[in-house]
């Protein structure tokens, strides 16, 4: 049936999360070539005669070793990709009972109602839909009534989303629980495709991808989706192959006994799903990732929403880093958790790289001695180029330059999160807005705008002083940073227009199959 709507969540997905053997083989081949090239570069870089200004040299070495660790971790993860097929419960006996928990806090009815309606139509189980409203809204109570859902509003709203879910778990009793963010519209097959994996009584939960249905609109949502597609594609499949799948907060089916054993969701963390996963693995539970889009959600539509989301993720994961390091789990799981948390330190490397040409032009200090720009590029460029190529291959076209640029332009979020974490400043759980502003948001990218201004100003000063080769090289390096950072913040300064209404067909099983074939 076709209706006129602007809700992209009702359309079939245009992305396939399943693995591609050719892409996996290509990533492995690239890694086999890139690893020795990386070692050649690092060996060249670490020679005593390369030391220029000692402090800058130490900072450069720290940044390069960090990036090499992240690159090697990425290659290792993608090497071990596993693609599980959807698995239904065996026939026979009554269908299992599943509590579907949908936490809500001041989101619009237009965002929430399609999720509740779709949850009530889930097949393969006896479903109890719970609308967990921390906004105590009369409109939300009516939504629940219209679709036969149970409405729950807490008197005390401690613990944010984790507390909201835990409160509902105390009222519910089904042996399984599906957690859905209120903007993620589930496919009717979600439980049919996942419950079979929970037949193994050692499995605590089954995670499925978070898909941003509004990504085709471009702008921030499109760039943010490029990052998500890389994670829920090759990276998530690799983590599953290594037995290290962690809960991502939505589109996840839990075994109730596992949640009870863990004491529910931890309420003192900004990333309660990440912390819970560590604890479940410590308790000996296994986890599963099914790479099929079985729910369609909304990504951040403006830069302020994206920044808010990334700040919460960065602070939560960095705060969980000590827990991951201390966790009594197999070394593979520990390494995967540490790599995931460490990603939110990568902004420091961008800051280091941006600072180098500025300091060289303004003060003459440089990290490297006894090395020309040509020598540096000969050793660095092959390794760096292959590392980027491996990411592009692993992303199978979904990871774009826009996603890469947005990540680089978010350097300051990682720096800020690190400092606040070290100061033990408690963060506040902020729900990512589901409807974005359609106006410029320069304040949301002010630190990156300042960095661009410094880089441009320094380049102008350098060119005014003279055109010697060292200056030209550093001005070119500064210009490269300006190009990438500008691309990353472009959607904040020139936001995309809202798409106009268009005929969209609800994504039933047939349409979902068409979407997978098209992808």
Image: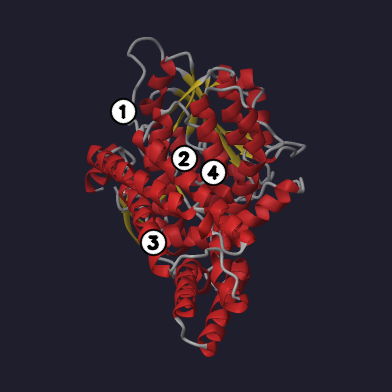
CA–CA distance between discs 1 and 2? 26 Å
The reply to whether callout 1 and callout 2 are in contact (CB within 8 Å) is no
Q: Residues within 10 Å of mark 2 (few under 14, many from 20)?
A: some
Residue at position x 44%, y 69% in the image: 496
- Among numbered discs 2 and 4, the one appearing first in the sequence: 2
Q: Which mark is residue 401?
A: 3
Q: Name the residue carrying label 2.
A: 117
Mark 2 vs mark 4, foreground winner is 4
Q: Residues within 10 Å of mark 4 (few under 14, many from 20)?
A: many
Regarding mark 1 in the picture, which secondary structure is present there? loop
- Among numbered discs 4 and 1, the one appearing first in the sequence: 1
User: Which picture quadrant has residue 445?
Assistant: bottom right
CA–CA distance between discs 2 and 4? 11 Å
Q: Residue furthest bottom?
A: 464
CA–CA distance between discs 3 and 2? 37 Å
Residue at position x 60%, y 62% in the image: 56
**Where residue 238 sits: x, y (%)?**
39, 34
**Where residue 420 sits: x, y (%)?**
72, 51
Mark 3 vs mark 4, foreground winner is 3
Q: Nearer the viewer, residue 270 or 238?
A: 238
Q: Which mark is residue 85?
A: 1
Does 405 sit left or right of 444 as displayed? left
Mark 3 vs mark 2, foreground winner is 3
Q: Name the residue carrying label 4.
A: 182
The reply to whether callout 1 and callout 3 are in contact (CB within 8 Å) is no
CA–CA distance between discs 4 and 1? 26 Å
Residue at position x 56%, y 38% in the image: 144
Does 136 sit left or right of 5 as displayed? right
User: Which picture quadrant has residue 341?
Assistant: top right
């Amino acid at each position: 049936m076709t209706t006129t709507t602007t809700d992209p969540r009702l359309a079939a997905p245009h992305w396939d999360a399943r693995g591609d053997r050719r892409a996996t083989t290509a990533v492995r081949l690239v890694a086999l070539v890139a690893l020795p090239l990386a070692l050649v570069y690092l060996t060249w870089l670490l020679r005593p005669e390369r030391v220029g200004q000692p402090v800058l040299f130490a900072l450069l070495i720290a940044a390069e070793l960090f990036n090499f660790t992240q690159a090697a971790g990425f290659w290792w993860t993608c090497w071990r990709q596993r693609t599980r097929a959807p698995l239904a419960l065996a026939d026979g006996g009554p269908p299992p009972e599943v509590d579907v928990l949908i936490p809500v806090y001041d989101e619009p009815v237009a965002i929430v109602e399609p999720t509740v309606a779709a949850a009530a139509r889930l097949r393969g189980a006896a479903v109890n839909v719970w609308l967990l409203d921390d906004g105590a809204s009369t409109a939300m109570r009516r939504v629940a009534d219209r679709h036969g859902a149970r409405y729950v509003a807490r008197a005390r709203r401690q613990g944010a989303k984790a507390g909201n879910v835990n409160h509902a778990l105390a009222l519910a009793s089904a042996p399984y629980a599906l957690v859905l963010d209120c903007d993620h519209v589930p496919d009717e097959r979600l439980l049919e495709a996942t419950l079979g994996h929970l037949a193994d009584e050692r499995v605590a939960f089954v995670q499925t991808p978070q898909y941003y249905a509004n990504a085709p609109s471009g702008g921030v949502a499109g760039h943010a989706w490029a990052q998500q597609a890389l994670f829920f594609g090759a990276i998530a499949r690799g983590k599953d192959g290594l037995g290290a799948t962690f809960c991502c907060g939505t589109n996840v089916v839990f075994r109730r006994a596992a949640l009870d054993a863990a004491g529910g969701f931890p309420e003192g963390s900004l990333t309660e799903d990440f912390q819970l996963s560590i604890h479940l693995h410590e308790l000996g539970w296994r986890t599963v990732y099914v790479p099929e889009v079985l729910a369609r959600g909304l990504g951040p539509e403006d830069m302020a929403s994206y920044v808010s989301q990334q700040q919460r993720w960065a602070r939560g994961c960095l705060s969980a880093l000590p827990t991951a390091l201390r966790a009594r789990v197999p070394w593979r799981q520990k390494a995967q958790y540490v790599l995931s948390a460490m990603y939110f330190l990568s902004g420091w490397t961008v800051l280091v790289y941006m600072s180098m040409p500025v300091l060289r032009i303004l003060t003459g200090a440089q990290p490297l001695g006894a090395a020309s720009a040509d020598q540096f590029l000969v050793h660095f460029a092959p390794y760096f180029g292959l590392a980027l190529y491996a990411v592009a291959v692993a992303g199978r076209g979904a990871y774009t330059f826009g996603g890469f640029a947005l990540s680089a332009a978010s350097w300051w979020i990682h720096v800020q999160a690190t400092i606040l974490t070290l100061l033990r400043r408690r963060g506040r759980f902020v729900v990512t807005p589901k409807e974005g502003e359609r106006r410029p948001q320069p304040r949301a990218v002010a630190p990156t705008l300042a960095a661009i201004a410094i880089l441009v100003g320094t380049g102008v000063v350098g060119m005014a002083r003279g055109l010697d080769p060292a200056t030209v090289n550093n001005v070119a390096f500064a210009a490269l940073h300006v190009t990438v950072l500008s691309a990353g913040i472009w959607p904040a300064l020139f936001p995309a227009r809202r798409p106009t209404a268009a005929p969209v067909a609800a994504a039933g099983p047939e349409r979902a199959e068409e979407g997978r074939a098209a992808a």
